[in-house]
C-alpha cells in the first residue's frame, strides 16, 4: 500500500506539471505522455482496492479468501494501458493530418525530463516491491511506468525537432509513444494472463520437489500443484510413504513435508500434503489407476 500511495503522489505531481505545459505549448506528444502518466498514476486505485480486499479473511463462500482480486486489478491495468494507447494514437494522427507549431519548446523539454525522472523512480520502486511480495499486478504496473519514462524522452526528441522548425516531429513522436505503449501492453497482458491461468515459474516446482525428496520418510513425490492467490502461493502435493507406516507416522511425515515446503519455497503460505502408501509388490499405484480410469 505504501508503494501505491507514494507512486500515486509522484506520478500525479508529474502529470500535473506536464498538463500545465501541454496547455501552454499545444504539444500532442507531451499530451500523450501526460495522459499515459495520469493513467499510470490512477492504476494505483484498483490495486489499492485489491490489496485491501486481499486482507479480508476467507468465508464459507470465498473459501480461499479474496487474494485473486489482484488478478482482476491486473486486468483493469491492462485495459487502462490499452485505452491510453488508443487515445495517444488518436491525438497524434489528428495532429499529423492538421500540423500546428509547438510553442514554449524549452518548457516542453523540461516537462519531458521531469516525466522521465518521475516514471523511472516509480518504476524501480514498484518493480522492487512487486517482486519482493510476489505481486504480478504491481510488477506490471512498474513496467508500465518504465515505458512511460522512455516515452517522455521521446517527447524530448520531438521538442528538438519542433525547435528546428519541423512541425511533423511532434505528431510523429506521438505515434512512436503509441508504439511504445503497445509494447508494454503486450508484456503486461502476458504477465497478467499467466497469473490468471495459475501459471508459476517451473523453477519453483523444481525447488519444491527437491525439498520434499529430502524429507525423511518420503519415498517419492506424486502430483504437485502450485498456484498464486494474490501475491501468496499455495501448494497441494501427494507424497509416497512406507506402506507399513501407521496413520500417525504418515501424518508426521506429511507435517514435516509441509514445513519443508514452507521453508524452501518463497512466498508459500499454505501447503496441503497427502500421504500415499507405497504400493506393495505386484500392487498397482492407486493414483496411476485413477488417472487411467479418468482418461478412459
Image: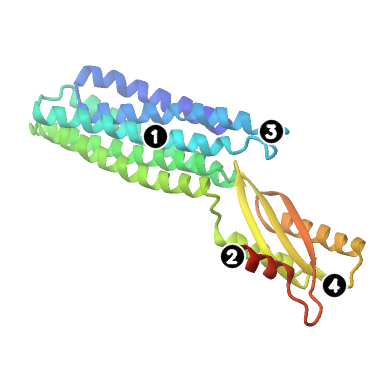
Question: From this viewpoint, which residue is outermost toward the bottom?
Answer: 281
Point out the tag, 3 or 4, that comes first from the N-terminus.
3
User: Mark 1 and 3 residues: CB-CB less than 8 Å, in contact?
Assistant: no
In the image, which disc is placed on residue 61?
A: 3
Marks 3, 2: nearer the viewer: 2
For mark 4, does the 10 Å Cα neighbourhood hold few (<14), some (14 to 19), or many (20 or more) residues?
A: few
Q: Secondary structure at mark 2?
A: helix
Q: Which residue is mark 4?
A: 243
Instruction: Please name the residue shown 50% across and 34% down the image.
Output: 73
Dot 2 corresponds to which residue? 295
Say if residue 114 shows up in the picture: no
Q: Residues within 10 Å of mark 1 (few under 14, many from 20)?
A: some
Residue 274's x, y, as percent?
A: 77, 59
Q: Quadrant of the N terminus?
A: top right
Name the one closer to the observer, 38 or 14.
38
Q: Which mark is first along the chain, 2 or 3?
A: 3
In three-dimensional space, the C-alpha distance between marks 1 and 2, rounded to whole angstroms, equals: 39 Å
- Using the image, determine if residue 175 lies above or below residue 254: above
Secondary element under disc 1, as helix, strand or loop, is: helix
The mark that comes first in sequence, 1 or 4, is 1
- Distance from disc 2 to disc 4, alpha carbons, whole Å, reads 26 Å
- State the CA–CA distance, disc 3 to disc 2: 31 Å
Precedes in sequence: disc 1 or disc 2: 1
User: Which-is-in-front pick, marks 2 and 4?
Assistant: 2
Mark sitting earlier along the chain (2/4): 4
Residue 143 in the image: x percent, y percent? Answer: 42, 43
Amino acid at each position: 500500500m505504501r508503494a501505491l500511495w507514494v507512486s500515486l503522489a509522484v506520478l500525479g505531481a508529474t502529470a500535473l506539471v506536464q498538463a500545465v505545459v501541454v496547455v501552454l505549448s499545444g504539444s500532442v506528444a507531451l499530451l500523450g505522455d501526460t495522459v499515459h502518466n495520469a493513467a499510470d498514476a490512477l492504476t494505483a486505485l484498483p490495486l489499492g482496492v485489491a490489496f485491501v480486499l486481499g486482507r479480508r479473511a476467507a468465508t464459507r463462500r470465498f473459501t480461499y479468501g479474496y487474494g485473486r482480486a489482484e488478478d482482476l486489478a491486473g486486468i483493469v491495468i491492462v485495459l487502462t494501458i490499452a485505452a491510453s494507447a488508443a487515445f495517444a494514437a488518436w491525438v497524434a494522427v489528428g495532429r499529423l493530418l492538421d500540423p500546428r507549431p509547438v510553442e514554449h519548446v524549452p518548457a516542453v523539454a523540461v516537462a519531458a525530463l521531469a516525466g522521465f525522472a518521475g516514471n523511472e523512480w516509480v518504476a524501480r520502486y514498484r518493480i522492487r516491491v512487486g517482486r519482493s511480495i510476489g505481486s504480478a499486478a504491481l510488477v506490471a504496473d512498474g513496467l508500465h511506468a518504465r515505458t512511460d519514462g522512455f516515452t517522455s524522452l521521446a517527447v524530448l526528441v520531438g521538442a528538438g525537432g519542433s525547435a528546428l522548425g519541423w512541425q511533423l516531429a511532434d505528431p510523429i513522436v506521438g505515434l512512436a509513444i503509441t508504439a511504445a505503449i503497445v509494447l508494454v501492453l503486450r508484456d503486461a497482458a502476458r504477465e497478467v494472463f499467466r497469473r490468471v491461468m495459475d501459471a508459476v515459474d517451473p523453477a519453483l516446482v523444481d525447488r519444491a520437489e527437491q525439498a520434499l525428496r529430502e524429507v525423511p520418510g518420503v519415498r517419492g513425490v506424486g502430483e504437485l500443484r502450485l498456484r498464486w492467490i494474490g501475491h501468496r502461493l499455495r501448494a497441494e502435493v501427494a507424497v509416497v510413504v512406507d506402506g507399513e507406516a501407521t496413520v500417525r507416522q504418515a501424518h508426521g511425515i506429511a507435517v514435516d513435508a509441509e514445513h519443508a515446503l514452507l521453508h524452501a519455497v518463497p512466498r508459500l503460505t499454505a501447503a496441503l500434503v497427502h500421504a500415499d502408501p507405497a504400493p506393495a509388490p505386484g500392487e498397482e499405484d492407486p493414483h496411476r489407476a485413477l488417472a487411467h480410469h479418468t482418461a478412459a
